[in-house]
Amino acid sequence: MSGAAWAEEMLQQWKQSTEQGIEAWQAMLGRTPQPNLSQYWMPFFNQGASLLSQMVREGGSPEVLQLWKRFLDEGIEAWSKALEGAMASEGFAAAFGKYLEQYLGAAGPVQKEMKKAGEAYLKALGLPSRNQIAEMTSQISWVESRIEELEAKIEGVMGSLASLQATLEKARREGT
Amino acid sequence: MAQQDVLKQWQEEVVRQVKRTEQAKEMFLTSGEPEVGQTPRDLIYRKGKARLYRYRPTAEAVYPVPVLMVPNLGISRPYIFDLLPGSSFIEYMVRQGFDFYLLDWGIFGDEDDGLTVDECILRILPVMVKKLLESSQAKEVSLLGYCMGAPLSACYIALHPEAPVRNFINMAGPIDFEKAGFFTTWMDKRYFDAEKVVDAFGGMPADLIRVGFKLLKPTADLSSYTNLWWNMWNDRYVEGFKALNKWANEYMPIPGCFFKQWVEEFYQGNKMVKGELYFEGRRVDLSNIRCSVLVVGAQTDYIAPAACVRALVDVVSSRDTEYVELPGGHISLIAGRQAATVAWPKVWGWLGPRSQ
């Protein structure tokens, strides 16, 4: 088969695969749990791999590889555009918000319980808890800030003293 | 094509394929971490988790006005600006003769959940600018805000009209949050409650940030791995990929109070550009910005779309403003081949004459 015929065949396969993929994605959108996107990506790889092996068997030119890569890139871009349209919708935002709320409802209390249990365990061992360390770090930060404020004030006072001293020097020189 | 040429091409392709396999084995079987952030620097000052670094000059002549780079807070690490020797924005700027400083906000933990946007703008940024001026002995400074660092810098300049800021560059920083694309839709107050996230986790966890950013471009990983396979015979490409991939998968949490304010006041309220944003009773009026301003947007930026970045030039009072929209996405401005050939020279070309 000539290089041009290979290219034409690949283009057709690519178009078909892209259309099927987009249809599948659109059909799945909005379902929970969210679909595993990799199941849509795999056909591209599989298609490429089978074309490649067929090409090697039949002695085609490697230039066709470049073409396949271009089709692949364009396929991914077409996917990206299709997903973009769907994900920019209010429907997606609402579905995502709902999913997040459910996740927070489930994960939040678990997280809090785990923290509580961890703290009780550390307390039993006589070790400081994460909260206590966090509190201590906050206090250190507060002390740091106070020191910075004091530094700034001292700098201000030193500046005033220097200017006062300069004024006095000047007055002394002028004999007033 | 002559049979001989076809054969030669196949031979080259076979060699590439062998190299790809070797690289793939090395990549997936060894755990070698790329060495990022190699440009020599010194720690100038620290406040809480924030650090001010100064990069050692390499150029013979140094511009008298130093540059302070203000990146995003949380989300990702700032070594993206100094990825690898030869592919580093900071290294590039230092070589052009800039006295370059970086504000690293730090890696946050539970103890930082009380950090507010007010604290960053009214205390951390002012003290960093002060320490920079002391260390550089300069009278003025240029601020270069990237991503979230740009609106934070804009608030700082607007609230401190007396600050000696000569130039301000906004690189991919959102300003008009109504035009912030996906994030504006997803974080609409009807669907997203920042308070609930903060209540559940204390802050915005890195894993949830990862979900948000991966959703922005679900095909990004596929695309980058396809390109990796294609270029795997090329050592330089693989080295760059490893470094960028490390960065792209290393998400950082955002402190709770900061996150809540960021979502509610910037995204949901769009208060900064409307002039309704207050910090400790002080109103942020972006028209107080009078220094020279360069705004750099990216044509396919999903994080901060060009329209929302561009808004800055319309609200400042500066006489010297320029907006430029470059090809590529959010990261293409700061890392990668396109950044090195298009975005970085643009920044240098604009900032150099204004730093004399």
Image (cartoon, coloured by chain):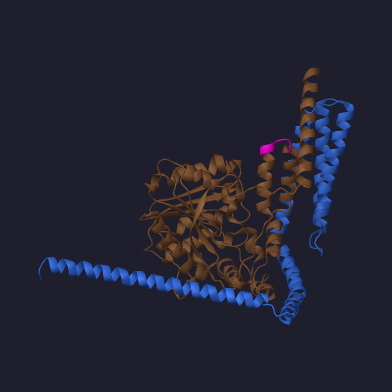
Q: Residue at x 57, y 59 (%)?
A: B72
Examine the structure image and report whether residue B235 is included in the region drawn in magenta. Answer: yes
> Extreme left residue here?
A175
Relative side of A158 to A98, left or right: left
x then y, percent, for residue B344:
52, 44
Q: Quadrant of residue B163?
A: bottom left
Q: Which chain is brown?
A: B
Provide residue B207's location: percent of width, then percent of height.
71, 63
Q: Which chain is blue?
A: A
Observer-nearest of B24 and B207: B24
Residue B148, position as x, y percentages in the image: 55, 60
x, y percent for residue B295: 49, 52
Which region is colored magenta?
B232-236
Number of marks drawn: 0
Q: Main secondary structure of the magenta part?
A: loop
Q: Is residue B58 left or right of residue A62?
A: left
